[in-house]
Image (cartoon, rainbow, N blue to C red):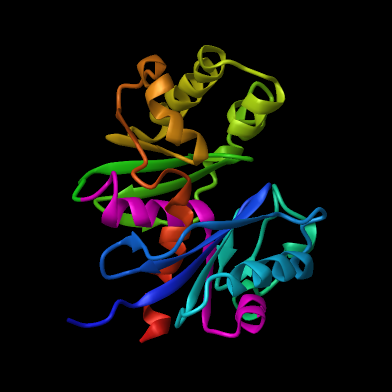
Amino acid sequence: MSSPTLLLGIDLGGSSIKGGLVDVHTGRLASDMKSVPTPQPSAPQEVMKAASVLAKQLPGAKAAGFTYPGVVKRNIALTAANVDSGWIGTDGAALASGTLGMPTVFLNDADAAGVAEMLWGAGRNTPGTVIMLTFGTGIGTALFSDGKLMPNTEFGHIQMHGVDAETWASARVRTQENLDFPAWIARVNEYLHYIHALFWPDVFILGGAVSERYEQFAPLLKSPAEIRPAHFAGQAGVMGAALAATDLAR
């Protein structure tokens, strides 16, 4: 039996940085999940110092994936909605590789989460149009057509009530405004209705740490599309980050 290929996944969020070792042959975590608070301000160098602390707790990886909550093209961060604006223009792959001391791929966080769910989780073997939604500090989105990703969709920034949707219906807003699940899900349902009217998905996959409590609010959700909880919940970004690094480990 061949030994597992362990890759490091690091998921940068607005409030925390999470990491774990993933066996990319089986799609399973091969370590405990670790996390550290996201530095404030969340400038690139400060984030990398924190990521280095995290990585030292997770030795043994051949390569790493590092997710970022914004648009990433050719390893360059192009937006910075929920992190320090100093990220814009930064070559995240080069910075992370130098910090972690191993080849590192740099990609959008929701795209990473979606890829993990489509390969190993709630979207496995699902044809048609699937939209992954991650509810956290913002709302991350990943769009798939017959399993193929269209990267960097950023539907959390669609305008609703005169503001970005994520500033009205994210999990952070639920906490900040002390909304109970009926009040929050009423906002989520309006958001789902808007996204459905634009893209007509067959399936929504709801992720982010709040999806660990899916059973508590699932009866309140309403959409013409099928709604599924993310299999990996708040771990999906870490899983997808590691998966994205597979080619680097060869």
Q: Quadrant of the C terminus?
A: bottom left
Q: Choose between 60 and 178: the one closer to the eye.
A: 60
Position of 234 with respect to 123 (left or right) is: right
Percent coordinates x, y for residue 153 in the rendering: 50, 49
Percent coordinates x, y for residue 249 in the rendering: 40, 83
Q: Quadrant of the N terminus?
A: bottom left
In the displayed orientation, state which residue is furthest to the top. 182
Percent coordinates x, y for residue 226 in the rendering: 28, 29
Position of 156 with respect to 117 (left or right) is: right
Q: Is residue 48 magenta?
A: no
Q: Taking 122 as reference, is 227 above or below it?
A: above
Image quadrant assignment for residue 248: bottom left
- Total of numbered circles in the picture? 0
Q: Majority secondary structure of the magenta segment?
A: helix
Position of 117 with respect to 191 (left or right) is: left
In the displayed orientation, state which residue is furthest to the right. 41
**Residue 89 seen in the current view:** no
**Residue 41 seen in the current view:** yes
Image quadrant assignment for residue 38: bottom right
Q: Is residue 97 magenta?
A: yes
Image quadrant assignment for residue 57: bottom right
Q: Which residue is at a point 58% across and 35% down the rendered structure image? A: 158
Q: Which residue is at a point 36% across and 16% down the rendered structure image? A: 219
Percent coordinates x, y for residue 6 in the rendering: 39, 75
Q: Which residue is at a point 62% across and 51% down the rendered structure image? A: 13
Write down the region rendered in magenta: 95-124
Q: Taking 173 as reference, is 93 above or below it?
A: below
Position of 218 with respect to 2 (left or right) is: right
